[in-house]
Amino acid sequence: MKVKGKIRNRSEILSHGDVESRRIVLDITDGTLKKLDSYDRIKSFMSLKGDILRIGYREWDLSKKNNVYLIGAGKACNAMAMAVDEVLGDRLTAGIIVVKIKEHSDRYNKTVSHKGGHPLPNEAGVAACKKILDLVEQANEDDLFIAVISGGSSALMSFPVEGISLQDKILTTDILLKSGARILEVNAIRRHISRMNGGRLAQRIYEKGAELVGISIHDAVGLPQTGDINKPVSYFGTPIGPDETTLEQAKWVIKAYNLEERLPPAVIKYLHTCGPGGETPKKFEGFTYFVINTVPDSCRCAAEITRDMGLKTMVLTTSLEGESKDTGTFLGSIAREIQQYGRPISPPCVILSAGETTTKITDSSLVKGHGGPSQEMTLSFAMAAAETRGACLISIDTEGTDGTTTAAGGITDSRSLQHAHNLDLDVFKALREHAAYEALQQMGDTVVTGNTGTNLCDLNIMYIPEIEAR
């Protein structure tokens, strides 16, 4: 099976290591990312004929609308916005989106894209938020907003409340992401100090009487896979949906992770003094939401492709969380069990998992390089799988950038540890100093995709071949 896909450095990855095992996981990865591309997903269920806009099973008569605006943010927003912009054509009044990476292939008719900051907010993101709010301030009950939102909007649409500076928000985000807190716990704080997140953008639209249609890739761990994407759904989170976190939860996170003395004083003061007025909205009437992908969809698509290749497959979990390097060791132990004893599935086979592992950094002075959870996972796997002949793991952040790097993730196999030794690379040191990116770069084992058109947290694909004599 030859798949021409999204991995840009495929030839480099296949120039060393266990080439056949690598080819298998790359083919599955490329096919999965193609199936998940939001441009194609949106074009499959959205169309405009005359004045009638169809999204899924719902229709809107645009002759009854004065203005139609496109707004959005997220790491997959480029592709999502291109699809909506193309469908609406000249019927679109204006569009403003905030993205993480601008690509040369991005093409818009009436939409302006701004490059925000992720994982840490920046001034450009705040400026874009102000422009979006200006559109909302002009709106009335005759206007329609179509919002395209994917993961990353919390940072890209980071416009702090009055009394909290952008630098306070940047420092808060950095501390939270290194604290070991789960993403929903991180968001409990970020949403309550934002003018956009936690449904506050939708609240502004609601107060103006305008209508909102949200199209989202929902990357929260623990949600079920999508069914019929044509059906509107109940929705929560992000700037456009009601918020399921509370102000009390935000305060609890501060205590649970011992952040009272670490977070900026302005943030601590605001959360403890804002009162009921600082709570995020919990309900909207009359808004319509569509979810085109959730985290389990990545494993579903990967499993379909794997079976088409004639290989057995098992989905280990779609709610994977925890320390990334420990997860790499764990997956390596599973690979060994499968190859030696045929448990819990016999080789050759593919083991799939998805979720959002994290990298805890208690002391930033220990950081000597760059990396991300997926890269730390694969570097750790290289050590654990050294004795499991042909075992190979690819781990990527499905949107195309892992952690603080421009790599989507990493790929290693049972030969990678010896390859690192031959290059005089200390893998243990690289993990201790959170410099997985530099190590994998030298090994030729980073995975580069650019924007993929989706954003479903992390996807891990592990192949374990059979050996003649166990």
Image (spheres, rainbow, N blue to C red):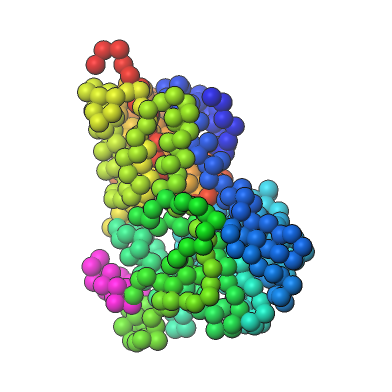
Compared with 50, 1 (above or below) is above
262 falls in the magenta region: yes
Q: Is residue 215 left or right of residue 140?
A: left
Q: Residue at x 36, y 60 (%)?
A: 183
Q: Residue at x 59, y 82 (%)?
A: 209
Segment tinted magenta in the rendering: 247-266
Which corner quadrant of the image does residue 8 belong to?
top right
Q: Is residue 378 visible?
A: no
Q: Main secondary structure of the magenta part?
A: helix
Number of numbered tags placed on the structure image: 0
How far across and down, in percent of the image, does residue 87 sit?
70, 57
Q: Residue at x 31, y 16 (%)?
A: 467
Which corner quadrant of the image does residue 426 belong to?
top left
Compared with 33, 96 (above or below) is below
Which corner quadrant of the image does residue 255 belong to?
bottom left
How far across and down, in percent of the image, does residue 6 sit?
57, 39
Q: Residue at x 32, y 59 (%)?
A: 182
How far across and down, in percent of the image, does residue 101 sit?
58, 54
Compared with 326, 23 (above or below) is above
Q: Is residue 243 left or right of residue 9?
A: left
178 falls in the magenta region: no
Q: Is residue 287 visible?
A: yes
Q: Nearer the viewer, residue 77 or 178?
A: 77
How far across and down, in percent of the image, does residue 265 sit?
34, 79
Give the position of the N terminus as an image quadrant: top right
Q: Is residue 431 left or right of residue 73?
A: left
